[in-house]
Amino acid sequence: MGDAERPAFYALSPGGWRDYWTLLHPPYTAWHLSYVAMGAAIAPALDGVWLAKSMLAFFFGLGLSAHALDELNGRPLRTRIPSSVLWTIAGVGLVGGVALGIDAAVEISPWMLAFVGVGSFLLIAYNLELFGGAFHSDLWFALAWGAFPALTGYFVQASTIRIPAVILALGCTALSAAQRVLSTPVRELRRHVVRVSGELELDDGSLRAVDAAALRAAPEGALRLLALATVSLAVALVVARYV
């Protein structure tokens, strides 16, 4: 499968274990898990065990469950994973995330049950496009996978929400919104556009051909760099608490 035929820049050729790699959306999953780490890192105290549990819970919810449900809705990644397996992955991911959330409610604060309820609702409502797709929008994507992970990561460590967490949540919401601004046209180009033709005329009179690859280059380059930058910032914030 050539680059132009791939449904995402990180997608591998369909079949076997490669489908499961593609299903995970590796750069995006790492990107959004970074918000959890950022939230934990700015808390007054940082517990590494609960940071790991928080990130594992979001990996279950986002990396597994949300992405499996998304693939069941029209096969946007063109994987060959059987629907029954995707449903199993979605169920296991949801149950795993909820179980870790309940564990946090018992060990940290009963208010964690509110986070479990909100997170489960957003996951299901967004990916299954419930209520006429009211929650399947760029805004809800940014809130669900930007603000919510950051606030959860902070609350698990601090058992409360303070102003720094709210400010961080706003920043993570903006980053996720930027991700959607960049990724939406790229997805359309890769998955739905059959042909692109045209040219740019420069002020020196020269002509430059325009094709799908040219249109994808800038936003995909920005997405790769933003994913790397977000993960690097999260790692730096966590490491700084220990050194």
Image (tube, helix red, strand yellow):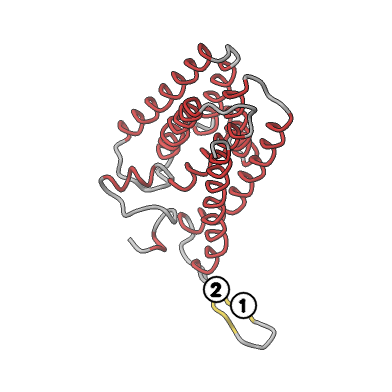
Q: Nearer the viewer, residue 189 or 54?
A: 54
Q: For the residues labelled 1 and 2, say whether their Cβ atoms are less than 8 Å apart.
A: yes
Which quadrant is the N terminus positioned in?
bottom left
**Residue at the limit of the structure toward the bottom, as seen here:** 205
* Placement of 177 over or under 6, stated as above or below: above
**Percent from the top left, x then y, of residue 177?**
64, 45
In which quarter of the view is residue 64 placed?
top left
Badge 2 marks a residue whose secondary structure is loop
> Marks 1 and 2, Cα distance to the nearest angstrom?
7 Å
In which quarter of the view is residue 109 placed?
top right
One can see residue 134 in this view:
no
| Label ID, residue 167 | none
* Placement of 237 over or under 119, stated as above or below: below
Label 1 neighbour load within 10 Å: few <14, some 14-19, many 20+: few
Badge 1 marks a residue whose secondary structure is strand
**Percent from the top left, x then y, of residue 238?**
55, 38
**Residue at the limit of the structure toward the left, as seen here:** 16
Q: What residue type is disc 1 on?
A: Leu
**Percent from the top left, x then y, of residue 223?**
54, 54
- Could you tell me which residue is drawn at 54 percent across and 28 percent down? 125
**Percent from the top left, x then y, of residue 9?**
44, 56
Q: Which residue is mark 2?
A: 210
* Placement of 206 over or under 3, stated as above or below: below
Task: Judge left or right: residue 82 versus residue 41.
Answer: left
> In the rendered structure, which disc, 1 or 2, sits on the residue that comes first in sequence?
1
Q: Which residue is mark 1?
A: 200
Which quadrant is the C terminus positioned in?
top right
Q: What residue type is disc 2 on?
A: Val
- Could you tell me which residue is drawn at 59 percent across and 37 percent down? 38
One can see residue 3 in this view:
yes
